[in-house]
Image (cartoon, grey):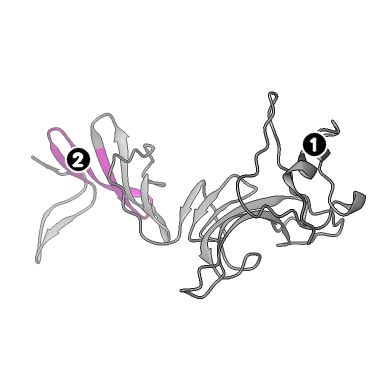
Amino acid sequence: TKKITYAELKAALDTGTGFVRITGDTMTGDLNVDSGNLRVRSTSGSTLELTNTSTTLGDNAFVGGLAFRNDDTSGSPPHYSGIKARTDGAGGTEMDLEFYANRDKYETDAPHMILRSTGNFGINIADASQKLHVGGNAIITGITRLGNGTATSPAYQFVDDTNTGMYRSSSDVLGFSTGGGNRLTLNSTGATFAGTVTVGNSSIGSNTSHLA
């Protein structure tokens, strides 16, 4: 580990190259700031680039990250929170961005959230297959808006039964489907059902009966 003073760092930046090289031209080693802040400022925008220079990165390889480390001795240090980049399953050519909190291991522990190279975002699930994929329960205290859906693919459907659920068939009309077919329609005048309605052991209607 190489420690440099603020004056040495400022002198390196004042060379006009825009780079601080540590341990010669290989860009390896550590830059430690024992106290205070490390700032990168520019009138034209600044970039902090973390590069894995290996040319043979495979699937699920650690590329780089930004870690916050807690060495509090009252617990079982260290613990990390931060962001890390990892190659996906495309042979190392594309990257996922992972977010994690209070993990024991910086490079290997599973993330809490992940932004896939496909644009899908996962919470508590590594293989996010949708634009938002939640592995667990969700509580939404505000308004949730869904697309209209259809009888064959309702807007509210189930992971293991995607053609059964609830959908908006037209303005102010709510449809319910099973097996990809409409079974019940609710509108401002009442309910229209397709098929047979059975109460107890008695059938009270069939096909397109209307209940108001």
Give the number of marks. 2
Q: Horizontal and vertical percent for residue 14?
A: 81, 33
**Residue 81 drawn in magenta:** no
Which picture quadrant has residue 134? bottom left
Which picture quadrant has residue 111? bottom right
Q: Main secondary structure of the magenta part?
A: strand
Please state which of residues 201 and 59 is positioned toward the viewer in this rendering.
59
Q: Disc 1 designates what residue? A: 13
Please state which of residues 93 and 107 is positioned toward the viewer in this rendering.
107
Q: Horizontal and vertical percent for residue 66?
A: 63, 53
**In screen coordinates, is 23 left or right of 102?**
right
Q: Is residue 103 above or below residue 121?
A: below
Q: Horizontal and vertical percent for residue 168?
A: 31, 38
> Is residue 84 something that shows in the picture?
no
Amino acid, disc 2: Leu
Ranked by sequence position, the earlier of labels 2 and 1 is: 1
Look at 8% across and 40% down and name the residue there. Answer: 212
Q: Quadrant of the N terminus?
A: bottom right
Return the residue found at the far top: 43
Mark linked to residue 186: 2
**Residue 179 drawn in magenta:** yes
Q: Horizontal and vertical percent for residue 6?
A: 73, 44
Q: Is residue 126 above or below residue 141?
A: below
Nearer the camera: disc 2 or disc 1: 1
Mark linked to residue 27: none
**Magenta-drawn segment:** 174-193
CA separation in Å, label 2 and label 1: 70 Å
